[in-house]
Image (cartoon, rainbow, N blue to C red):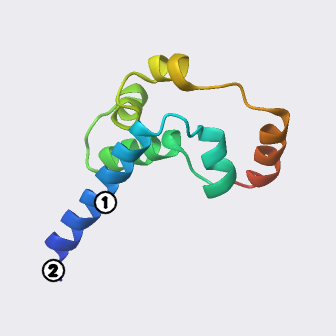
Amino acid sequence: MDDATRTELEAAAFRRLRDHLQTRTDVQNIDMMNLAGFCRNCLSRWYQEAAAERGIEMGKEDAREAFYGMPYAEWRDMHQTEASDAQKATFDTASKGH
């Protein structure tokens, strides 16, 4: 497989992950962090960093909108729930050194 095709396939898989997360609003970021070590905010930050590496200016909110499918504040108000004490404790343990 050539590099261009590999990049196209990786980009397609990445877009599918982004789209999947936009439809799974029931999946909370803290759960993703606790189970996988990353969340929508991480993906948006990585996207923003990749843009910056290529000399493209992108604000934090623009990058987040790419992963939430809407402004982050709107998504948060519509879909984010308060983390339980157990979720917070797991996050504190899991995120040490991260």
Q: Residue at coordinates 84% horizontally, 34% vertically from top-left? A: 85
Q: Which residue is mark 1?
A: 13
What secondary structure is marked by label 2? Answer: loop
Q: Nearer the viewer, residue 24 or 55?
A: 24
Left or right: where 21 falls relative to 79 = left
Which image quarter: residue 64? top left
Left or right: where 14 falls relative to 25 = left
Which image quarter: residue 35? bottom right
Q: Residue at coordinates 40% horizontally, 38% vertically from top-left? A: 23
Seen in the picture, residue 85 relative to 72 is either above or below; the reply is below
Percent x, y of residue 82: 71, 25
Q: Nearer the viewer, residue 23 or 6?
A: 23
In the picture, the disc for residue 2 is 2
Q: What's the residue type where badge 1 is placed? A: Ala
Q: Nearer the viewer, residue 91 or 87?
A: 87
Seen in the picture, residue 23 relative to 74 is either above or below; the reply is below
In the picture, the disc for residue 28 is none
Q: Residue at coordinates 66% horizontally, 40% vertically from top-left? A: 30
Label 1 and label 2: CA atoms lie apart by: 17 Å
Which image quarter: residue 6? bottom left
Q: Residues within 10 Å of mark 1 (few under 14, many from 20)?
A: few
Q: What's the residue type where badge 2 is placed? A: Asp
